[in-house]
Image (spheres, helix red, strand yellow):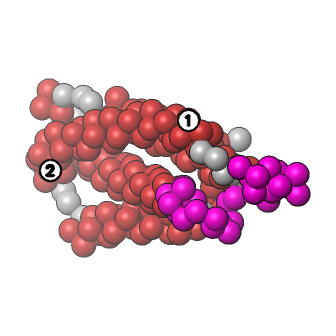
């Protein structure tokens, strides 16, 4: 179900998906440019990068939780405006909430999995450090791309709502069509 919803989200919001995937690809390309590292180098790199990746995860978790709270405010605001919005607007907000929640959960899981004391890992094979190093790079690129996708979706939603509220009498694609009775009532007011 989650994969199906993410595919639907990517299909309907190709710009945000493309930008998010691009950020992920840039992060992964940087790793490819560095080249293969040995076990000892991986252990040293892992000890240096884990605090930064933990900070990245903390920041994304905080941002995701804040965005979810702000989406509730957005829904309250959109229901209080005089214009009637189409169902497509509320579907976008629902998709955005799903994507933000997914970003929150995935980042939290990554944070919990990567929050281990690497300095106390004596006796582990060097292949283990190499694997964990590359996994951390892939995970940080993934969550970085996800949060950028969230920000693009949020921007598009806020931009549409701002255009609807700011331009009176607008023929915006997300405004619901009024029936003749509602139009007559608005003219009389």
Q: Name the N-terminal-most of marks 2 and 1.
A: 2
Residue plotted at (45% across, 58% down): 155
- Looking at the picture, tell me which residue is in the foreground, 103 or 122: 103
Q: Which residues are magenta?
A: 161-189
Q: Is residue 151 above or below residue 118?
A: below
Asked if residue 59 is positioned above or below residue 24 in the image, the reply reads above
Q: Are marks 2 and 1 in contact (CB under 8 Å)?
A: no
| SS assignment at label 1 | helix
Question: Residue 114 appears in which quarter of the rendering?
Answer: top left
Nearer to me, 45 or 183: 183
Residue in the picture at 33% in, 35% down:
62
For mark 1, what is the residue?
A: 76
- Tell me where residue 22 sits by quadrant: bottom left
Residue 131 visible to an observer of this rendering: no
Q: Secondary structure at mark 2?
A: helix
10 Å crowding of disc 2: few (<14), some (14-19), many (20+): some
Percent of width and height locating residue 47: 13, 41
- The residue that mark 2 highlights is 45
- Asked if residue 34 is positioned above or below residue 150 in the image, the reply reads below
């Amino acid at each position: 179900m989650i994969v199906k919803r993410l595919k639907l989200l990517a299909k309907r919001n190709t710009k945000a998906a493309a930008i998010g995937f691009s950020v992920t690809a840039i992060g992964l390309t940087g790793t490819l440019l560095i080249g293969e590292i040995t076990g000892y180098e991986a252990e040293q790199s892992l000890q240096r990068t884990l605090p930064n990746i933990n900070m990245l995860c903390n920041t994304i978790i905080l941002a995701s939780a804040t965005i979810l709270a702000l989406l509730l405010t957005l829904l309250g605001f959109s229901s209080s405006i005089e214009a009637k919005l189409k169902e497509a607007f509320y579907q976008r907000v629902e998709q955005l909430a799903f994507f933000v929640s997914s970003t929150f959960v995935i980042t939290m899981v990554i944070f919990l999995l990567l929050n281990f004391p690497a300095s106390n890992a004596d006796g582990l094979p060097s292949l283990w450090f190499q694997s964990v190093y590359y996994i951390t790079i892939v995970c940080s690129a993934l969550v970085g791309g996800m949060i950028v996708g969230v920000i693009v979706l949020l921007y598009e939603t806020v931009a549409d709502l701002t255009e609807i509220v700011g331009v009176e009498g607008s023929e915006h694609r997300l405004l619901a069509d009024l029936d003749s009775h509602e139009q007559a009532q608005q003219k009389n007011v």
